[in-house]
Image (cartoon, rainbow, N blue to C red):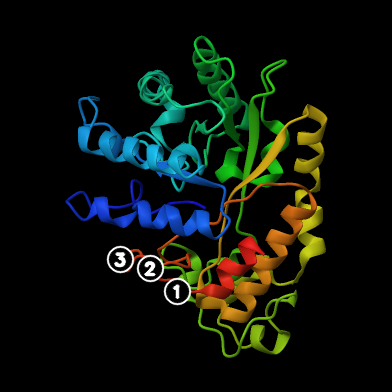
Amino acid sequence: MNIGIWLSQSTIMDERREKIFTEDDIKLLVNNGFDHIRLPVDEVQLFNEDMTLNESTVKILHNTIKTCLKYNLKVIFDLHIIRAHHFLDTHAALWSNPAEQDKLVEMWKVIQNLLRQYPVTDVAYELLNEAVAPTDEQWANLMLRIVKMIRQTEKDRVIVLGANMQNNVAHVKNIKVPEGDKNIILSFHFYEPLLITHYQASWTPLRILNFDGPMKYPGQLIPDDVYNKLSDEEKTVVEPYHHSYDQEWMRQTWSEAIAYAKSKGLMLYLGEFGCLVNCGENIRLAWLKDVVDLARQNNIPYALWEYSAQFGFADRWNKGKITNQALMDILIK
């Protein structure tokens, strides 16, 4: 489970922040069979502008990890957004300014010093969320540099290496794996087709769409009669998705990444997947079920994006309240 929109992608920095994800939430997850969380944390929350640590965030981070471990819930610390890189910015300074790459390595030295106290069996490091480097090689080489630094003092810590281009499954095969290092997890994210998962999402071109009639999944997402009524602008947005999708399509899309992980003897991890309700609840649940079933068939651990905001199933302010039991059941049954 991703605990998103909390220590990442959130402007809530007052006393409410401590109430968003608490021991009650951890107990809810554990009692329903979840075994780990992925914890996204942004640079702006963890580090002040002068790169000193934000002590209130450090306190929350330690309290959260310690409480998770109390209930045998494992944690992946995910450095999600940094000042020099956002997963929607294809011209981020991280890729053009070597000083920003040096800064990322230094950030990880500080993060490592914070987290190395926790057992290597229970806490893992994820170096950066959804890199969008100009080339796969540039991101792969920067990951290797950070891994080399971490391995100087932590030989057995599990490190999650994500594929370039927003953890795109097609780019997993280009992740460089340190020779002989088996404490590595290869990660991808999956939101395809976006026409289902992000239909009408305000931060995407899909925001202009408003179909006359429901989409279909599995099958051709937009019936021809509906497609033909779209404006030229809408057709431009929809065209890349104007064909059929089903679990077999997913299987073929993942196959190369699965084979690459097997060739390296490493675990493949679905670090994010999720779907907004806008496409219709039946379609949403059918898509989610296909993803989870396929992951299980291939022994791929998975983490939903996310717990208690737009994509999730829990009420972040009313502790213990499940807002979508059917969605949670797909994840755990």
- Whole-number angstrom distance, CA of label 1 to CA of label 2: 6 Å
Residue sitting at x 36%, y 33%: 84
Image quadrant in which you'd find residue 215: bottom right
Residue sitting at x 26%, y 36%: 59
Residue 282 as seen in the image, left or right of residue 49? right
Q: Please, what secondary structure does the residue beneath circle 1 have?
A: loop
Q: Please, what secondary structure does the residue beneath circle 3 have?
A: loop
Residue type highlighted by circle 1: Thr
The mark nearer the N terminus, 3 or 1, is 3
Residue sitting at x 35%, y 63%: 316
In the image, residue 332 lies at what x, y percent?
63, 61
Residue at mark 3: 317
Residue 247 as seen in the image, left or right of residue 289? right
Q: Decide which of 230, 169 is in the foreground and name it.
A: 169
Residue type highlighted by circle 3: Trp
Residue sitting at x 55%, y 45%: 166
Q: Decide which of 180, 65 is in the foreground and name it.
A: 65
269 up-or-down from 112: above or below: below
Residue 98 as seen in the image, left or right of residue 304? left
Residue type highlighted by circle 2: Asp
Check disc 1: other Cα within 10 Å, few if <14, some if 14-19, many if 20+.
some
- Whole-number angstrom distance, CA of label 3 to CA of label 2: 6 Å
71 up-or-down from 49: above or below: below
Q: Decide which of 67, 217 is in the foreground and name it.
A: 67
Residues under numbered marks 3 and 2 in contact, where contact means CB atoms less than 8 Å apart: yes
Q: Is residue 233 visible?
A: no
Residue at mark 2: 315
Residue at mark 1: 323
